[in-house]
Amino acid sequence: MTKEADKQELNAVRAAETPGMVSTGVPEEVARRYREAGLWVGDHHWRMFARTVERYGAQPAATDRYRSVTWAELGETAAAASARLAASGVRRGDGVIVQMPNSVAFLETLLGIWRLGAIPVMALPAHGSTEIMYFADTAPARHYVGPARGDRHHARVVAHLAEQRPAVTRVEVDTRCEGSPWGEHPVADPADVSTAELAFLQLSGGTTGVPKMIPKTHDDYLYSVRASLDVCDLGEGDTLLTVLPAAHNFSMSSPGILGAMMRGAHIVFAADPSPTTVLPLIARHRVTHSALVPPMLLSYLNSPERPRHDLSSLRTLWVGGAKLSAAAARRVTPELGCQLQQVFGMAEGLVNYTRLDDAADVVVNTQGRPASPWDEVRLIDATGRDVPEGEPGELITRGPYTIRRYHRNPEANARSFTEDGFYRTGDIATRDAQGNITVVGRAKDQINRGGEKVAPEAVENALLEHSGVHDVSVVGIPDEALGEKILAYVIRQAGRELSALELRKFARESGLSSFAVPDAIEIVAEFPYTGVGKVSKKQQRERD
């Protein structure tokens, strides 16, 4: 598609849109089928929350470092949030960038925006001026909500936004006060919003470039939460610890904050993911569930702080966002005393879980099966043909909560979606006879060493079996003779001596193919991470 064609498509999309009505690309006949099957039930995020308030009013709803509220109290403060936002100029259909820390106020902001029929744009605290400006221009967003007392990074973002986009209204919220930060403003009735309207703009979880914007409707997103709850054990009386950024798709819906809201569970927000913050919170609040990315799980497993805290309340950990090594997966139940559910999903839609009654081998070595029987998953080769069972192929998917286009991004749409509506995930995976998916790697991360294709995850898993290794990240680096060589970055276990020579010997004896043994191993103190805790292999490749 040419740049001129891109521009024409974008202009056509903008001209066709009315407030709140942004196409996700799902054909009407497909949408009708989802409705008739009872998947899209005509629910709305605010109405779902209102039912929770009525059903669980006196029970604890949300807690952060500074305050705690019941569901009934959250109903009042969320209405107050909507009143303050309305007084600041937020109207139905407006885009509102939300860049808040993990806090009760984040939840109030989100609910307040939904109550007005406006559209949250789910920015992460780590997003900088480049991303925020892009969201403001592309959503488009007329308003920005952030903390009144943010860090220096946030101060720079706000100053840049004020200078470059003065028309964007800025609302500052005191996330550190012990009472409601919303003040007194007239409260109007909730907006009458179609459940087919845009609920919010989620952001792609990729590690390169400006995040793509993912349009989610009330119908499709709430179905994804219900599908996740069907295969998870989160319920009334449980406590969910939110460690990842609250606005992240994993935190929100797998089954996440919204799943806790549906079931009346207690949501506890961690201010940061460090073991010194998280482990005491688990003990203090008797946390039963949490969603983590692998580096976080490893930091808790290996923390010298762990034996000092009572973690016996933990029942289930959901681990996803990046590939979890078999070595780490095997440690969860013996060392933490809880069940592991591996999660493999994407903000664009599809989410897979290992099941609570799966055999240990499935939980340790696979990323499970789709949450919904309506999820369509294919593994294809370079020609677009389905690969045989057990063979690796690119995973493509479509279904009742998977988008068929990005928001105002024709170039990405042409690249990322097939003509018949499948999303190209870029993940290379295999599938067994029971439908369990095992992620082999990312198509873009695969290393071509002298014509031999090497999956970084295979090398990482082999090195992680060494008792002195805390974490590993493998990338390909340019080489004049081979095209690419294999470079492994390794973080040692605390107090362990480890050499590159020892690790290369271990890799050779591990059963790896000879061409998959790392050409170079570098011992490092830490990895570069993205805003949601994924290792940034892009930065690692550029560092070499």
Image (tube, grey):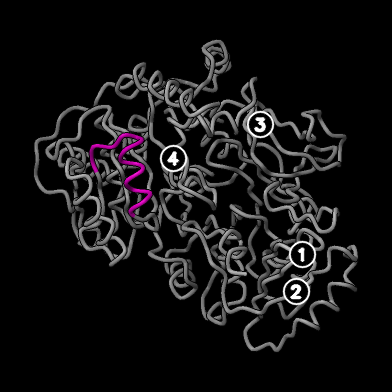
Label 1 vs 3, first from the N-terminus: 3
Residue to which mark 2 is pinned? 520
Residue to which mark 4 is pinned? 202
The residues tagged by marks 4 and 2 sit, at their Cα atoms, a distance apart of 38 Å
Residue 397: assigned label? 3
Label 2 vs 1, first from the N-terminus: 1
Residue 122: where, in percent of width, then height? 38, 44
Residue 116: assigned label? none
Judge by depth and name the residue closer to the eye, 217 or 474: 474
Amino acid residing under circle 2: Ala
User: Callout 1: helix, strand or loop?
Assistant: strand
Amino acid residing under circle 3: Thr
Closest to the camera, between mark 1 and mark 4, is 1
Mark 4: few, some, or many residues within 10 Å (few <14, many ≥20)? many
User: Callout 2: helix, strand or loop?
Assistant: strand
The residues tagged by marks 1 and 3 sit, at their Cα atoms, a distance apart of 32 Å
Residue to which mark 1 is pinned? 485
Q: Does residue 130 belong to the magenta stretch?
A: yes
Label 4 vs 2, first from the N-terminus: 4
User: Callout 4: helix, strand or loop?
Assistant: strand
The residues tagged by marks 2 and 1 sit, at their Cα atoms, a distance apart of 8 Å
Instruction: Classify 254 as above or below 512.
Output: above
Q: Residue lying furthest front in this view? A: 480
Residue 376: where, in percent of width, then height? 68, 28
Closest to the camera, between mark 4 and mark 2, is 2
Amino acid residing under circle 1: Lys
Q: Quadrant of residue 53?
A: top left
The residues tagged by marks 2 and 3 sit, at their Cα atoms, a distance apart of 36 Å
Residue 476: where, in percent of width, then height? 71, 61
Query: Where does the magenta region start and end?
Result: 129-143
Q: Are marks 1 and 3 in contact (CB under 8 Å)?
A: no
